[in-house]
Image (cartoon, rainbow, N blue to C red):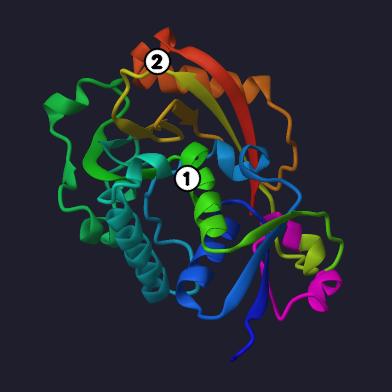
Amino acid sequence: MVASSKVAVVGAGVVGLSTALCIQENVPRVTVTVIAENFIEDTLSYGAGGFFRPDENIGPSYSTTRRWYKESFAYFQQLAGDPAAKDAGIKWVSGCSLSSIGAKCLKNGIMEELFPDLRMLSQEELRRYPPKYKFGVFYTSLLADPRKYLKWLTNKILQNGGTFSKRTIKSFQELAGENDIIVNCTGLGAKSLASDVLLTPVRGQTIKIDAPWVDQFCYADGCYILPGTEYVTLGGIKQLGDWNTKVSDYDRRYIWETCTSVVPSLKDGEVVHDWVLIVS
């Protein structure tokens, strides 16, 4: 009998949990342990919007980026049709992206390939929004609400025999004697753990509100409105090189005023909490 390999996945955000489950489902004879300081609601992933919106300007090459998006979309598409979709927080959401600059920034080749209903908004449809938005597209995509998806991933890993360890590590060498393979999913933590000096923080800030009547997403220049399974996420802050984890009143005011100018009924929603995310 072949002994199983011990795999340690370091990091328990959506990347770490997704990686752990992927290993369990695709690699035979492994035991997986997820090691992290924080889990589920204490992770940065918990406050994200979770919307699937392809960006061609990432990855080592266009072909690789295209393959990543196609495989990921197929995975979530299959999960959306599964009875587990509700527990996993997966749902289809239609909506629009608006721009005051031009139409080219609203869509790309990957979006055209994955979203069959992608189309330009008519002038009549654009008149529903502030006059500065001269261009817009409509499409339907998938949303994975982190508030449910992280819990679902955790339960799946446990069902498959995985374990979790709440632990702070200062070096991957601490895990070397205990594991055959170590997978780094620490995000910005890799700046120190892997001595990756090129990693740069990108700060985001969101507002979660209770507004169940909002059922369509909307991107408008620098803001976004994403209806999750429980709350609507308002955002639009992307600050390169900023490590500040505190809620900024200035950023909060910008997000609120910009989003409510696009969808005025948001003003009737109840603010649940604010969230700051620092990603790489």
Residue 264 shows which numbered tag? none
For the residue carrying disc 2, how many other residues have a C-alpha within 10 Å: few (<14), some (14-19), or many (20+)?
Answer: many
List the residue tagged with mark 2: 266
Left or right of 16 on screen, residue 145: left
Q: CA distance from mark 2 to mark 1?
A: 25 Å
Q: Which mark is residue 149?
A: 1
Q: Quadrant of residue 109?
A: bottom left
Mark 1 and mark 2 in contact (Cβ < 8 Å)? no
Residue numbers of the magenta segment: 172-190
Residue drawn at 75 percent across, 57 percent down: 189
Residue 162 is situated, as x and y percent measured from the top left of the image, at 60, 62
Decide which of tag 2 and tag 1 comes sooner along the chain.
Answer: 1
> Can residue 177 be found in the magenta stretch?
yes
What secondary structure is found at the residue carrying circle 2?
helix
Q: Quadrant of the C terminus?
A: bottom right
- Relative vertical location of residue 111 with respect to residue 226 in this rendering, above or below: below
Residue 57 sits in quarter:
bottom left
Question: Residue at 23% of width from left, 40% of height from top?
Answer: 137
Q: Where in the figure is residue 18, as x and y percent of width and height?
A: 52, 59
- In the picture provided, is 49 more to the left or to the right than 194? left
Q: Is residue 12 magenta?
A: no
* Residue at image coords 80%, 75%: 178
Amino acid type assigned to the residue bearing label 2 in the image? Leu
Q: Find residue 224 and report its horizontal and vertical position in percent.
A: 42, 33
Residue 224 in sight: yes
Q: Mark 2 or mark 1: which is in front?
A: 1
Q: Position of residue 41 (x, y in %)?
A: 62, 37
